Image (cartoon, rainbow, N blue to C red):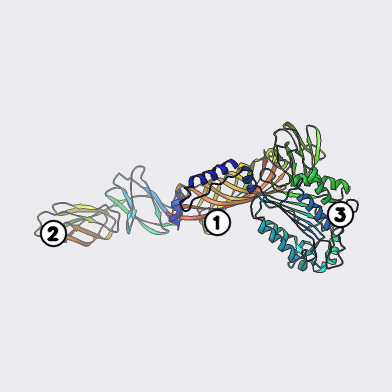
Amino acid sequence: MASSLSVTLCACGGLDNRPLTTGAIGGTAMGCDAEGVVGVVGDASVRVTLGAPCTFKLEGLEPGTYQLYVAPTARKVTLVSATVEATKLANVGEIEGKPGAFARVRISAPGSPELEGEIRVPDLPISTTAVGRSGQARVGPFPEGCYRLEVSMKGLGNKTATSCLTEGLEQDLEVLY
Amino acid sequence: MRYFRTVALWLLAAGCATPSLEKGGLVKLKLEQSSLDEAYRPRRFALLIGIERTADETFRPLRYSVKDASDLAAALKDPAVGRFDDVQVVTSAVATTRAGLLEAVAQLARKANRADDIVVVYVSAHGTLARDERGVLRRYLVTSDANVEKASQTALSMDQLEGGFKELASRRRLLVLATCHSGSGKSLLPREVEAELKTLKAGFYAPPLEEASRASVVLSASDWGETAREDEQLENDIYTHFLIEGLASGDRNGDGAVTATEAHDWARRRTYAFTKGRQRPSAEILEVGADPIVLSGAVRRFGNPELFSYSQRLDGFTLTVDGETKTELPGGAAVAPGKRRVELTKGGAPLFDEQIVVGEGDRIELDALLRRTEPRRSVTLTGGAFGFADAASRAALLPAVATAGLAFRYERLFDAPLAVQLGLAGSFGSHTLIENAPFRYQLITGSVGLDYLWQRGWVQVFAGPEVAALWLNRSFALESYVGAQNVVTVMPGLSMGLAFLFLEHFELSARARVMLGVMSVDGQSRALGFFSAFAGAGYRF
């Protein structure tokens, strides 16, 4: 009915109440650079990259409590908790990053002279990392804790590995095919 | 037209003519123009009813009702006057029963079956008022079998008579009522109705019968609530006497014919004068083009231009032409062709005072002349409300908001009861729909519509379709969301309203409208209803 009417009646633009039922989280990532990233833990799709003046705002968040992944630079990271209310901005203030942990991933695939693939961290807004021909990659920065990594290698398939990392340290992780 | 018919018939006869030895041949006829004229001449029918006595002896016999019908019949039949083709006089007790009269009208309808036939129905009888089975006070014609206390069951309802009159195929029909219903003179009322009427200070409150259908003319010997009288000296119903006289002498405009309105005007003035103002014959006339009901003579030349009015609105006004008083309205007057200064006055300042140019054969209805000079445009400042029709949208999108605007109306479009209206209204302000989500809004609506207009005195009622356009903007400045939302939609709808006109150039009006539009809400296209209502004060010019 509505669609047939819209043929004869013209309208443009629209009214949208959806922005009124969500909130936002904002703050400042101190000492950020162009590689800085802020996102929501558990939903890698919600992320913003940082730039001067290092302020960030994540919009369209349903009301609730969120863990925020704040990486002011490619080496520093920290987790911050924030509670979102509809129409409100939850300000987490100025966030200082801590030295991040990194996972040195080594892919072992006997019989495969050349390797090609990528590594994703599904629970954090860390960019997808490419695996070099040597079968090695450095993924991070991680806050201290245990994380799942999804390894997807061309011609070899997908594998999942878990790595528990310590703040400021790099840890090896071998994935066998 | 006549020439065309002659040529067409000649061509038909000549084109189809074949040698006489062949089957199916046509015989060539010699058709005289006079024969064709005669064949196409509008026929004239008259049904004249005179009811002298009734079975109920409480109605005193009328002395001249039969004579009224007979005298009028003689005038209508007279080759030098009416030249009517078929004149039927119904006066016997058997023929003037309720059933008899309905049958007579039905017979007339069977005979006068062409649109250009002229039909005259005349009634001279007692009249009465009675309540019908639904308790509505109605007028009744006292037939020969009527009983005053059971009038609604035994007498002939005027509505029924008028209904039969309207059934006639003729578009040139005249109903003359030489009767009245006031309880005196040619009338007698049931006791309870008489008692009821005595308690009324004002006049009668039942609707008058004299409502004319298109191209119909209803003449009444007396106005509503007055007495129609017989007179011994005249030996006729007074109005009927002068109406017959008017058939011979009432050619006001000198065109050779006496029309129904001319005869009525003749009789009306003389009846009024004869009764010293106690009886004012009335007429309700709706003409389309030239008056088509010629009662006597024939139109031989263009007549002098006529100015006339039978409108209740101009009742009592005096028509003055070039400073010379012509007549008191209702009525009419013929004037010489040319530029004439026409005035309509009733006591104080003239209602109308303009120069107009009139030519031979013109028939100018003063009411229409007046309407042409009356304001037909209005500009109105309005205040009102606009909103979504459904409560859910009012709660979620925008509540009903106050508006201010401007409306323009142009009435009597094409001289018809139509008006075109344009409207512009706007509103702005702030609201909070969802908790902690205040916003500012602005809206503008523009509309164009066509109204059918009913006007009775100083009250106008109008209704019609319209199309409106809406622009609505909502601006949010929330902690989490800053942005503006705009929507434009076109909404067809219906509107109706009324206006009270006063002091010639001013009006108070109100209008309500419902509309249907489509707009995107939360990313989905939806059909939504809207309403608006406003009132305002306007200037007419």
Front: mark 1 or 2: 1
Q: Which residue is mark 2?
A: A108
Front: mark 2 or 3: 3
Q: Do we see residue B73 in this rendering?
A: yes
* Secondary structure beneath label 3: loop
Query: Is residue A155 left or right of A42 when viewed as pictured?
Result: left
The residue positioned farthest toward the right in the image shown: B233
Q: Tell me the amino acid under the disc marked 3.
A: Arg
Q: Position of residue B98 (x, y in %)?
A: 75, 65
Q: Chain of mark 1?
A: B
Q: Quadrant of residue A105?
A: bottom left
At 66% from the left edge and 53% from the top edge, which residue is drawn? B170
Crowdedness of circle 3 by 10 Å Cα count: few (<14), some, many (20+)? many
At 54% from the left edge and 58% from the top edge, which residue is drawn? B390
Front: mark 1 or 3: 3
Distance from the alpha carbon under mark 2 to that under mark 3? 129 Å
Q: Position of residue B339 (x, y in %)?
A: 72, 30
Tell me the tag on residue A94: none
Distance from the alpha carbon under mark 1 to that under mark 2? 68 Å
Q: Which residue is mark 1?
A: B389
Q: Quadrant of residue B128?
A: bottom right
Q: Position of residue B315 (x, y in %)?
A: 78, 45
* Secondary structure beneath label 1: loop
Query: Is residue B67 left or right of A13 when viewed as pictured?
Result: right
Q: Which residue is mark 3?
A: B229
* Secondary structure beneath label 2: strand
Q: Tell me the amino acid under the disc marked 2.
A: Ser
| In the depicted structure, whether residue A139 falls above or below residue B149 | above
Q: Chain of mark 2?
A: A
Q: Position of residue B181 (x, y in %)?
A: 82, 58
Quadrant containing the C terminus of chain B in the rendered view? top right
